[in-house]
Image (cartoon, rainbow, N blue to C red):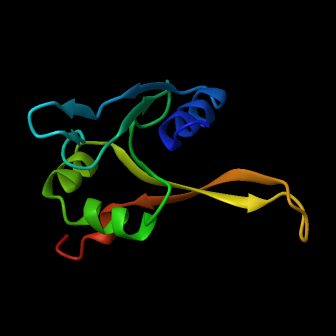
Amino acid sequence: MTSPTQRSIKMLKDDGWEVAIVEKWNQFAKIRQDLFGFADLLAMRPGDKPQLIQVTTTGIASRIDKIKNEPRALTALLSGFDIYGHGWRKIKVKRGGKAMRWEPRIIQVTKDDYPCL
């Protein structure tokens, strides 16, 4: 089984993006820490804005809320980054069938999500 992070990396690389994992393991606190408090991945491709991406399998809506409530996310948007949430879920390949495949639900966070602007 692959992790949601690995699925997002493969999807982005297949689309021509260079991707880096930017979350780190804090061995003292025993937790993973996201870059700027919200980003698991950084993706870049010539001609496109760089992307900061939060990846999950559950609760994509709560992750998007987390991003919107992180002040550094607005700073990243104003600095020229695009921000996305990738929520991975299993769906049936064929209605009524048993075969399943992973599909991403991709949500973009934009400056319009901040009413203070």
- For this view, does 30 lie left or right of residue 23? left
The residue lying at 61 percent from left, 26 percent from top is 16
Percent of width and height locating residue 116: 17, 74
Percent of width and height locating residue 77: 28, 50
**Looking at the image, residue 41 lies above or below residue 89:** above
- For this view, does 8 lie left or right of residue 14? left
Q: How many marks?
A: 0
Q: Quick one: 88 or 73, which is closer to the camera?
A: 88
Q: Quick one: 30 or 65, which is closer to the camera?
A: 30
Q: Quick one: 37 or 6, which is closer to the camera?
A: 6
Percent of width and height locating residue 43: 43, 32
**Looking at the image, residue 51 lies above or below residue 37:** above
**Looking at the image, residue 110 lies above or below residue 51:** below
Name the quadrant of the N terminus. Answer: top right
Q: Residue furthest bottom?
A: 115
The image quarter containing residue 8 is: top right
Percent of width and height locating residue 89: 61, 58
- For this view, does 104 lie left or right of residue 3? right
The residue lying at 90 percent from left, 62 percent from top is 94
The image quarter containing residue 61 is: bottom left
The residue lying at 23 percent from left, 39 percent from top is 35
**Looking at the image, residue 23 lies above or below residue 60:** above
Name the quadrant of the C terminus. Answer: bottom left
The residue lying at 23 percent from left, 32 percent from top is 25
